Amino acid sequence: MGIISVEQTDRLYWLGRYSERVYTTLKLFADSFDQMIDAQEGAYDGFCKKLEIPNIYTSREDFIERYCFDPEDPNSIYSNLMRTYDNAVVLREEIGSETLSYIQLAVYEMNRAKESSAPLIWPQKVTDNIVAFWGMADD
């Protein structure tokens, strides 16, 4: 890898932070999803409180759609994945194209998931790509 500039070190830090945030929120979301669809309408409020994010959502469906896929919601899984991707692209020379490809695959899965009727399959696919990214980065 050689010598890394302070700017690139900062980007590596944020790449790690955002990828960890995506991974963690995906796990928490998948664990809470069943409770949200089976419980009363406002059950997603507990999820927001647990993560200490503002409850800006109007319904369970709005929460699921916007929290997962809204690029404008700074707390959404999608917006954090895109921050991960933005840092990874800039760091392509340092991390390599193969490593970057797993973040690209995660973005691809998120885009496919938006149209999916299987709500609990896509988080696993995105999670798998994040973990594969970490494995490649470690190598």
Image (cartoon, grey):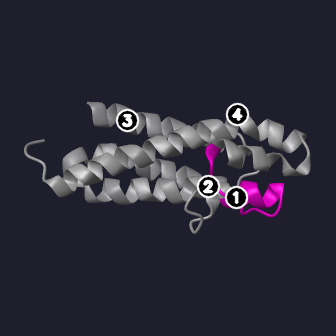
Of residues 25 and 82, the one drawn nearer to the viewer in this rendering: 25
Q: Which residue is mark 1?
A: 115
Task: Say whether marks 2 and 3 touch (CB < 8 Å).
Answer: no
Tag 4 or tag 2, which sits nearer the N-term? 4
Tag 1 or tag 3, which sits nearer the N-term? 1
29 relative to 35 in the view: left or right = left
Say if the magenta span includes residue 54: yes
Q: CA distance from mark 2 to mark 4?
A: 21 Å
Q: Which residue is mark 2?
A: 112
Q: Which mark is residue 31?
A: 4
Mark 1 falls on what kind of element? loop
Say if the magenta span includes residue 9: no
Mark 2 is on which residue type? Arg
Position of 34 relative to 63 (above/below): above
- Residue visible at 64% across and 54% down in the picture: 68
Of residues 49 and 98, the one drawn nearer to the viewer in this rendering: 49
Q: Nearer the viewer, mark 1 or mark 4?
A: 4
Tag 4 or tag 1, which sits nearer the N-term? 4
Mark 3 is on which residue type? Trp
Mark 2 falls on what kind of element? helix
Q: Which residue appears farthest toward the right when viewing the image?
A: 40
Q: Which residue appears farthest toward the left when viewing the image?
A: 3
Of residues 57 and 88, the one drawn nearer to the viewer in this rendering: 57
Q: Which residue is mark 3?
A: 134
Task: Say whether marks 1 and 2 touch (CB < 8 Å).
Answer: yes
Tag 3 or tag 2, which sits nearer the N-term? 2
Mark 4 is on which residue type? Asp
Of residues 37 and 113, the one drawn nearer to the viewer in this rendering: 37
Mark 1 is on which residue type? Glu
Q: CA distance from mark 1 to mark 4?
A: 21 Å
Counting from the top left corner in percent of width and height, residue 107 is at 50, 54
